[in-house]
Amino acid sequence: MNSIDLAEMSNNFVYASMITLFLATIFFALSYSAGRTRAETRALVDSTGSVIPPAESSSSEAATTPANPGWRMANIGLSLSWLSAGLLLVGVIVRSLWADRAPWGNMYEYSITSALGILLVYLIWSTRRDLRWLGLFVTIPALLTLGLAVTVLYTEAAQLVPALKSYWLVIHVLAAIICGGAFTVAAATAGLSLIADRHWIKQLPSRETLEKLTHRIIAFSFPLWTFAVIAGAIWAENAWGRYWGWDPKETWAFITWVIFAAYLHARSTAGWKHQKASVIAILGWVAFLINYFGVNIFVNSLHSYAGV
Amino acid sequence: MATETTTEQVPLPPMSRVGFFRWMWRQLTSMKTALILLFLLALASVPGSVIPQRGINPILVDEWLTDNPTWGPLLDTFGFFDVFAAPWFAAIYILLFISLIGCVLPRLGVHWRAMRQPPPPAPRYLMRLGGETAEINEQPALILSRAEKYLHKDRWRVIRSGESWVAAEKGYLRETGNLVFHFSLILILFAVAYGGLFGWRGNVIVREGEGFSNTLTQYDAWSGGRLTSPDTLPAFSFTLEDFNVEFSRAESQRGAPQLFEADVSVVRPGESMAANERIEVNYPMTIESAKIFLVGHGYAPQFIIRDSTGNIVFDDAVVFLPQDGSFTSTGVIKVPDSTPQLGVRGIFLPTTALSEERGPFSSFPAPDDPSVFLGAWEGDLGLDSGIPQSVYTLDSESMEQLGLRALRPGETWELPGGAGSIEFVDFERWASFQIAADPGKEVALIASILAIAGLSLSLFIQRRRVWVKVRPNAATGGTTVEVAGLAKASGDDPKENVDELVKYLIGEAT
């Protein structure tokens, strides 16, 4: 198979993944309109254990999940999300085969892998607990990321510039991509926790549960983000001769880190545990986005290369 | 304020100086202050990414100052062009670190004592904590022994009180990790400061075939920390034997660099023989404390200049600096030895192209169709004025322009009025190197690894307590067992431990 075929094949898988994800989004949205009452949902989520150990949820969950038209829609949405993630994974792998390197050498590749990261963080987490109510708020950002990737950011695969030829590319960028997925899911749960008390969406878990979920996912991603930053510093030391130089990308990585550190401190400070902490979590995600899009596109940074 | 206060004003006792400092210290080390300082730190970093910074791009800073004559100097006064070295930025992180030390130091003692203490005895009304009750047809002592065995195996710290209860606790590493993380941050700060004081860095441009030896005078730019001695630079030298570069010719990303390699022969300190080595991007050369990085490259066109009598007054390759991604390069030749003195401004184009708007420019970075565009001046170069001049700029104020000319390799320009000639012989390549030493970086790396390890422990490990209480049940002849747990962190729940322990105690009995 020649390389043009591989490129087209990758694109087709990405498009197929987008269509599937679009359908998943519709089914998730429908699950809210034909749903159960708030009281029932609350009972379901609370009884599945809103707390730290993830392993305990399975058995009681199956028992308390009745056949319900709303959740049936969400189940279809969840299955479609798995399918979409599978298609996207193939698309990313084929792209990587075509380019003959890690599939994140430019913004387009980084974005499709990030969309995959968002989906996988959500889907893997959803195998451990019932997160069907969250589906819509994860598929939408993933879909937006993919849409942006194929329309604005699309680049033909090319060889890496010498500065990117390093195994640190795989380690540093992969960690950042997983964190991006986790921060996005955390921003979704944090955002929902802010509106949970207003009863706009009946299917949502309680505010406390949403806050705990946000905390858990940030507790998972904060050490990983720390690692991503340090891996970047080690690479920078090898490539540019200094481990930290306040390049705009480094500065915003630092800002993101400080904001999430503030989130974790807020969670153990009286008067800051709830709404304020959730707002901080969303701010951290915004800082991550600024670093991801803003710095590459608007600012002159050492990290701006390879087709945006 | 017009609002009436109904509560009586309680006269506060006058605060002593010690009391005031204690109050200040408490404020500073409170979590809320730490939170505010964290926000300030994030906020204060933002201008450093938006406004050009001297440490990263001094040329851009100068342009910014020229473009904004009102705001520029004002921002400059407050250090906005060097945010991360500004006093107000330092104030924030120093306060943050004092707050951190004030918060963490007392916890060190508390944790040390907690680590050496046995788990607290079972509460009198254990079932108020939730938990589970079971009837087991066995002797109380046997059940407690089994509970002890299980908990020991599950790595709990266990104590037992005779035949009435067992208390267990685990997750001490959570606080250990928390403390390790915060102390690692302090260590990172020290490592950065140490590297800043004792480190140094310099930049040098070396042409193909040219050598460099590591002394201060050979550098184009050099800066060292306050406690760095330039006399102690490692004594090495190297010659740039060959420089290879390749650019992409594919339709997309045309002209993007694909490869840079500098082949050097290097003489290491204490050695007399040269060894061949290769320096690439991402693969620096390490010599003692110093690392040599390949950071840039360009072209050096070679000229022979003759004066009016035909004597050679200049014969050398001149470093031209690239101005864009296609290596449209500019440079200057100064010939002080001819009378009158001669000055030349030039543009070197590796692949020559011309357009209405841009004039001459290069359309591709590789030397497919090289040429130079020269402008010559004669008169006084101004070198004797005592004011230091850059080798890349020509001060033509007291000079007279002789003309403009484009040359290809091998061509000669006979200057008008018999003023001499300029021959564009050929071109060489040059590479620029950054040579740096940061003695703090190893410590910074170790501290960073410790920080991640500590952070992971403090976030993934849960501090929990479990109690097992037994009492003989006279009615059945068996034993009533109560098991309950308590989590230290809010949001954590020891339910799984309680469930498993009860399951084990019942399961082993039947």
Image: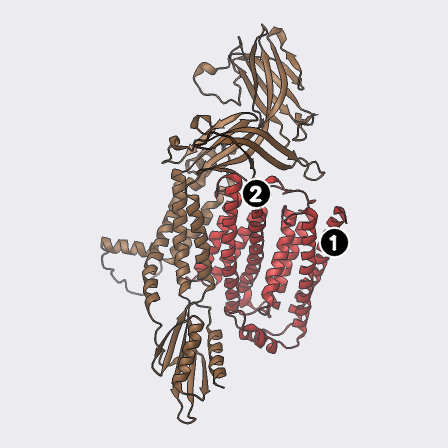
> Which of the chains bears the disc numbered 2?
A
Residue A15 spot, x, y in % from top left: 72, 55
Residue B90 spot, x, y in % from top left: 39, 44
Task: Assign a secondary structure to mark 1.
Answer: helix
- Front in this rendered view, residue B485 or B18: B485
Instruction: Name the residue that disc number 1 marks.
Output: A12
Instruction: Name the residue that disc number 2 marks.
Output: A303
* Identity of the residue drawn at 58% across and 48% down: A292
* Identity of the residue drawn at 72% across and 52% down: A10
- Front in this rendered view, residue A293 or B299: B299
Q: Chain B is drawn in which colour?
A: brown
The image quarter containing residue A23 is bottom right
Q: Chain A is drawn in which colour?
A: red
The residue sitting at the bottom extreme is B475
Type of residue at label 2? His
Task: Assign a secondary structure to mark 2.
Answer: loop
Type of residue at label 1? Asn
Relative vertical location of residue B470 with respect to residue B375 in this rendering, above or below: below
